[in-house]
Image (spheres, helix red, strand yellow):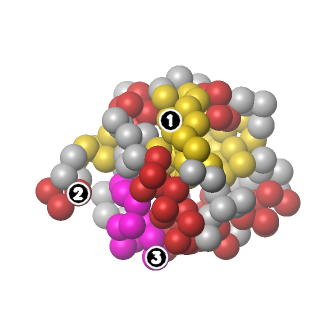
């Protein structure tokens, strides 16, 4: 079942690489007590994710914060080291939390795990974004396969 408005973010374990130290929490705990935007992408360093999707959130981070967003997180089925390196390369530090879902458990729990092309090698998270308050989904924007329209930073900002 795909995550929907009113659903809680799952308690699936995620990791972050913060200044070379790996921290562990759950996706739900990451969102508790604040208004967050969670963006999921098929993979770090992939073309659409690196050139269009995540850069939009990095560029508009201060505008999203001004509209009441406490944190922006980017979730991918990659390890914390890859997510940390990708975030550094794109300038996400201090703007977007890079959330590693190494085993895909968060993507599975949200019902957004999908098999991508063989080039990615495994099940990945579908491209989407959501707005959650205190761990509860208020808006969900799931893309059709191959698309980037409803989950862009500009599209999500219109719902704040």
Q: Position of residue 49 (x, y in %)?
A: 43, 66
Element at label 3: helix
Give the Cα separation between the discs numbered 1 and 3.
24 Å
Secondary structure beneath dot 2 equals: helix
Mark 1 touches mark 2? (CB < 8 Å): no
Residue 67 image offset from top left, x and y in percent: 82, 57
For label 1, the SS is strand
Q: State the separation of the CA atoms marked 1 and 2.
A: 20 Å
Which stretch appears magenta? 38-51
Q: Which mark is residue 14?
A: 1
Residue 48: in sight, yes or no?
A: yes
Q: What residue is at 77 percent from the left and 50 percent from the top?
A: 69
**122 relative to 8 in the view: left or right:** left
The image quadrant that residue 139 belongs to is top right
Mark 1 and mark 3 lie on one chain; the one further toward the N terminus is: 1
Instruction: Read off the residue under disc 3.
Output: 51
Q: Mark 2 points at which residue?
A: 120
């Amino acid at each position: 079942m795909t995550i929907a408005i009113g659903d809680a973010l799952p308690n699936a374990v995620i990791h972050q690489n913060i200044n070379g130290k790996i921290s562990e929490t759950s996706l739900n705990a990451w969102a508790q007590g604040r208004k967050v935007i969670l963006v999921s992408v098929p993979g770090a360093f992939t073309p659409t994710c690196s050139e269009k999707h995540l850069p939009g959130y990095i560029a508009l981070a201060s505008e999203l914060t001004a509209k009441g967003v406490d944190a922006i997180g980017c979730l991918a089925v990659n390890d914390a080291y890859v997510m940390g390196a990708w975030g550094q390369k794109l300038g996400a530090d201090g703007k977007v939390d890079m959330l590693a879902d190494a085993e895909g458990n968060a993507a599975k729990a949200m019902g957004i795990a999908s098999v991508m092309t063989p080039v990615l090698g495994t099940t990945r998270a579908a491209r989407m974004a959501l707005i959650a308050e205190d761990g509860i989904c208020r808006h969900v924007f799931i893309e059709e396969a191959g698309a980037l329209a409803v989950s862009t930073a500009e599209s999500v900002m219109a719902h704040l």
